[in-house]
């Protein structure tokens, strides 16, 4: 098994904190495609974190649903995701929830208390807060990690548990005689200390255990739990809500209605993600039902899409979303259909010729690097599928060249 340094610093060959390199396995086809991480349990064990935490983190960052089957040791992220991308996200998770903020050492435990999460470092002793704004925080508070274990491998006991199972003085062996002597001495000195009745403080620090006080605390705690549950389960991820809404209303809703919903969910600025979900939600079923009228379907939603493709980066995001659309739907993965979709974009002012040509040349070309100013925030398809799609789009490039030559001939005749 290949081991790498924890935290992404692979320059130090003698770094002693290692973890297995993440492995991803893509299963299924079409809308059922998913990515399985076979060695997630081994990775989580190296990080001293439950395997559900990094898996849930992947879902939050990728805007994808996840499934954690601890019984059968299967951790799944919906969609096709390369191992390199997931490894990058895992390094982000490690920096946020594993490495100590002071000494950058991974020997930390996550401790949850008073609706806060801290990293308790066993190397330098610092206790540092994690970023409480991330969506994963709600999940960790709801499902906190198991208590840290002592050096002997046993979970640390709460105060009073030793008395129930027998004191060390009665169960100690001859090898532990020194510890027993020290324990007896401490107990003898403690017996001479004043009791609570002998020592009275002016302030009353005792917890009110009356029925009314207990009921009040229970009510407040239940309310907090319901608030957390509502934000995580009922509201859910905004893109999950958008997908569900589009599934129910895509055919009947107008472009204005859809745009209002996007604004309402607060994601209108996240162009890459929005376009991906719009293209899949609006066109996946309609294109398959009536392939001959692709341009008609695009024309109906052109005004909506134009709000997100006002620059080359937005148009590149539209092409990326289309790559996902045709790769997940086998019926659309044909040259004539891909060219029909591109023609629909071109005729409805959603795609400019120079953007299409730069995309066709690939990300290593000068035109591509000069035209597009930012890196996409969304994972689309892997390099092999991207190349296949661009090859299938070449007939549309040929049509553009012929159309340009015809225009030149008309100008010469004039």
Image (cartoon, helix red, strand yellow):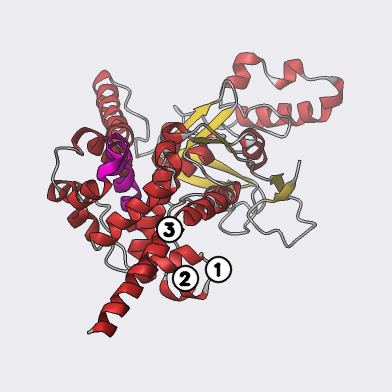
Which contiguous range is marked in magenta? 272-293
**Residue sitting at 31 percent across and 69 percent down?**
311
User: Counting other residues with Cα less than 10 Å from the Cα at mark 2, is it few (<14), some (14-19), or many (20 or more)?
Assistant: some
| Cα–Cα gap, marks 1 and 3 | 21 Å
| Occupied quadrant, residue 218 | top left
Please state if 333 lies on the left or on the right of 209 as rendered: right
Q: In this picture, is 175 found above or below 150? A: above
Pick the front one: 31 or 334? 334
Residue wearing tag 1: 364
Please check the rendered image and state whether residue 284 is part of the magenta-colored stretch, yes or no. yes
Pick the front one: 394 or 75? 394
**Which secondary structure is most common in the magenta stretch?**
helix
Please state if 4 lies on the left or on the right of 118 as rendered: right
Point out residue 92 in the picture as x, y percentages from the top left corner.
53, 53
In front: label 1 or label 3: 3
Mark 2 or mark 3, earlier in chain: 2
Q: In this picture, is 386 found above or below 361? A: above
Pick the front one: 263 or 203? 263
User: Counting other residues with Cα less than 10 Å from the Cα at mark 3, is it few (<14), some (14-19), or many (20 or more)?
Assistant: some
Disc 2 is placed on an element classified as helix
Disc 1 is placed on an element classified as loop
Mark 1 or mark 3, earlier in chain: 1
Disc 3 is placed on an element classified as helix
Residue 152, can we see it?
yes
Residue wearing tag 2: 368
Q: Do the residues labelled 1 and 3 touch (CB within 8 Å)?
A: no
Residue wearing tag 3: 395
């Amino acid at each position: 098994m290949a081991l790498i340094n924890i935290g992404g610093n692979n320059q130090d060959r003698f770094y002693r904190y290692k973890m297995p390199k993440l492995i991803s396995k893509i299963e299924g086809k079409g809308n059922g495609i998913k990515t399985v991480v076979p060695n997630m349990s081994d990775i989580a064990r190296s990080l001293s974190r439950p395997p559900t935490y990094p898996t849930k983190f992947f879902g939050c960052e990728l805007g994808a649903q996840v499934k954690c089957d601890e019984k059968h040791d299967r951790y799944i992220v919906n969609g096709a995701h390369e191992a390199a991308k997931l490894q990058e996200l895992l390094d982000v998770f490690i920096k946020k929830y594993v490495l100590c903020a002071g000494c950058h050492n991974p020997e930390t435990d996550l401790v949850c208390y008073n609706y806060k999460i801290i990293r308790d470092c066993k190397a330098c002793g610092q206790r540092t807060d994690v970023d409480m704004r991330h969506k994963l925080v709600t999940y960790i508070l709801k499902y906190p990690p198991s208590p840290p274990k002592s050096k002997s491998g046993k979970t640390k006991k709460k105060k009073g548990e030793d008395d129930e199972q027998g004191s060390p003085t009665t169960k100690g062996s001859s090898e532990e005689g020194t510890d027993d002597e020290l324990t007896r001495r401490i107990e003898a000195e403690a017996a001479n200390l004043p009791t609570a009745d002998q020592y009275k403080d002016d302030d009353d620090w005792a917890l009110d255990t009356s029925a009314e006080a207990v009921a009040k605390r229970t009510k407040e705690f239940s309310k907090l739990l319901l608030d957390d549950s509502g934000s995580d389960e009922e509201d859910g991820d905004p893109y999950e809500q958008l997908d569900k809404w589009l599934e129910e209303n895509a055919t009947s809703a107008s472009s204005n209605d859809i745009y209002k919903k996007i604004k309402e969910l607060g994601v209108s600025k996240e162009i890459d993600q929005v376009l991906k979900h719009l293209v899949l939600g609006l066109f996946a079923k309609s294109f398959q039902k009536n392939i001959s009228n692709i341009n008609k379907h695009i024309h109906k939603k052109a005004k909506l899409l134009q709000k997100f493709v006002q620059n080359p980066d937005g148009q590149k995001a539209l092409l990326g979303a289309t790559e996902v659309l045709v790769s997940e739907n086998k019926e659309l993965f044909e040259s004539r259909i891909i060219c029909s979709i591109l023609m629909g974009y071109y005729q409805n002012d959603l795609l400019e010729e120079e953007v299409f040509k730069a995309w066709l040349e690939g990300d290593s070309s000068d035109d591509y690097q000069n035209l597009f100013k930012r890196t996409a925030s969304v994972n689309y398809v892997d390099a092999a599928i991207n190349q296949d799609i661009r090859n299938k789009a070449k007939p549309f490039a040929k049509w553009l060249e012929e159309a340009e030559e015809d225009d030149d001939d008309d100008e010469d005749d004039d």
